[in-house]
Amino acid sequence: MKFVIAVDLEGIAGVVGQPNMTLTESKDYDFACRQATKEADAAAKALFDAGAKQVIVWDNHGGSLNLEYEELDKRCDILLGVGFPHRWTSMDEDFDGVILIGYHPMDNTVDGVLAHTFSSVSYQWIKINEREVGEIAIDAAMAGEKGVPVILVASDDKGAKEAKDFLPWAETVATKIGFGRNAALSKHPDRVIDEIYEKTKRAVKRLGEMRPFAFEEPMDMEIRFKKLEGAEGMGKSDGWKRIDAYTVKGRLNKISEYY
């Protein structure tokens, strides 16, 4: 068995950031990196204990280079850096599942901790086939193109619900309850580590129930920018039409044409 663990930071236990800052700029960043390493490591250990032969940990928050790599189980391989040709580089159809650690709810989520979709400064929302989507669904669809299912998502309670809405088969771990963009009631970080380990082992036992996720194809994609300059520039690209001052729309044959 082979798996990929994708690691973001906003959904990690004990992480809320600070107002008017990205998480990377906040006092929470160093703790987030340490705790994300521990949560990813818990998932990796559970996968190896369940019989995995390869586990890739993908450090994908911002510009990457966030995790404390020497603290990960030494059997892991590590995907890091920027400039890859597409998301899920190094994963192919032979992989059995992916795990999303530290993911966060999409933009427009009420009381979602650090909620955004790819860029908190660029986008107001992204829709596919008229439904708002975030990084959970998009990364699940990218993996789904390769026939690989998401088997577990760890996020705040809003992100865990979002995951269940798109991926009802997946196990979820709610790391904290969101009370605002920068406010949460978090589980103790060590309890979250234990829960990720146990839920990961359960997910592997349920592999036969897991399903690759896909959007209906071809698909309409709408992007609403926070600044009209973003829509103005995108609206001049081939295949994209500006439908109002802040919003563009395009048609894709598959999600990997964009991501």
Image (spheres, rainbow, N blue to C red):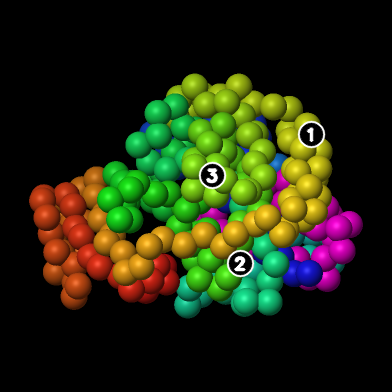
Total count of labels: 3
Sequence-first disc among 1 and 2: 2
Residue 103 in magenta stretch: no
Rendered location of residue 66, percent (x, y): 62, 54
Which residue is label 1 attached to?
Answer: 190
Label 1 CA crowd tier, 10 Å (few <14, some 14–19, many 20+): few
Q: Residue at x 73, y 27 (%)?
A: 188
Q: Residue at x 82, y 65 (%)?
A: 52
How far apart, in angstroms, are the residues tagged by discs 3 and 2?
16 Å
Q: Tell us which disc is closer to us: 1 or 3.
A: 3
Sequence-first disc among 3 and 2: 2
Disc 1 marks which amino acid?
Asp
Query: Does dot 3 land on a helix, a strand or a loop?
Result: helix
Q: Give left or right: position of 241 versus 139.
A: left
Sequence-first disc among 1 and 3: 3
The circle drawn on residue 148 is 2
Rendered location of residue 83, percent (x, y): 48, 73
Furthest toward the front, the residue is 209
Quadrant in the picture for residue 148: bottom right
Which residue is label 3 attached to?
Answer: 163
Residue 48 in magenta stretch: yes
Query: Does dot 2 land on a helix, a strand or a loop?
Result: loop
Residue 4 visible in the displayed image: yes
Do labels 1 and 3 touch, CB within 8 Å? no
Quadrant in the picture for residue 233: bottom left
Q: Quadrant of the N terminus?
A: bottom right
Task: Give the residues drawn in magenta, as a range.
Answer: 36-63
Disc 3 marks which amino acid?
Ala
